[in-house]
Image (cartoon, rainbow, N blue to C red):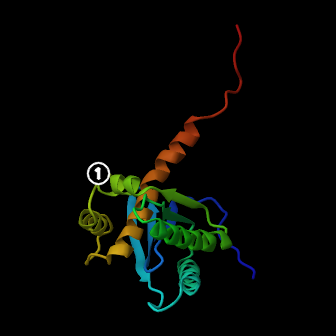
Amino acid sequence: MTVTMSSQPFGDTLRVVGIDPGSRLLGWGVVESHGSRLRHIDNGVIVPPVDADLPSRLLYLHQGVVQVITDYQPNCAAVEDVFLAKNAQSALKLGQARGVALLAAAVFRLPVFEYAPTSIKRSVVGNGRADKHQVQQMVRALLGLAETAQEDASDALAVAICHCHQLPFERALKNRVRPATNKRTR
């Protein structure tokens, strides 16, 4: 398989695929950022067959994420980090679904950025403990959506928005922290 994707600088416009991983439902959302303006491109949910075993579900999820990346050509991927689950089995399956998403991004050589759920909520809503409904409403408002996106797709859009909000700060820090050059001596 020969795959080439953007390793070039983002420039002024950034296209991010946000991913909310899950082994039963994997939400995805594509957002463009131009300066402080956000534009919704598309979103959806990848739903493997209910009766499929775990390896088949993971393969289905991988193929779905690869298709999204192929169709929308993002510059990077933003993925929700694992939260502390009460059930160890659920945490393992979530980790496997995240791995599938990370692998799909790596196949296309996309830079991957990971964000904790509280960071995403704080970036989108202003409160790291916001509930799902608040996140959905802010995603709708920030992107000017006519309708509220499905919950998992809305979460994925929130991950993409979080990355778009974080990037200017990361660039500013990178530009401020420069090695000292041309020191003057007296």
Q: Quadrant of residue 143?
A: bottom left
Name the element at disc 1.
Answer: loop
Looking at this view, name the residue that lies furthest to the top. 186
- Is 110 placed left or right of 53 in the picture? right
Q: Position of residue 27 (x, y in %)?
A: 43, 75
**Could you classify mark 1 by the number of other residues whose Cα lies within 10 Å: few (under 14), some (14-19), or many (20 or more)?**
some
- Is 121 placed left or right of 100 in the picture? left
Q: Position of residue 156 (x, y in %)?
A: 41, 69
Above or below, 57 against 182 in this view is: below
Amino acid beneath label 1: Asn
Q: Residue at x 71, y 11 (%)?
A: 185
Q: Position of residue 10 (x, y in %)?
A: 58, 60
Q: Residue at x 53, y 69 (%)?
A: 98
Above or below, 57 against 107 in this view is: below
Above or below, 163 against 52 in this view is: above
Residue 111 in sight in this render: yes
Q: Position of residue 89 (x, y in %)?
A: 48, 70
Q: Residue at x 40, y 58 (%)?
A: 117
Tell which of 157 and 21 is nearer to you.
Answer: 21
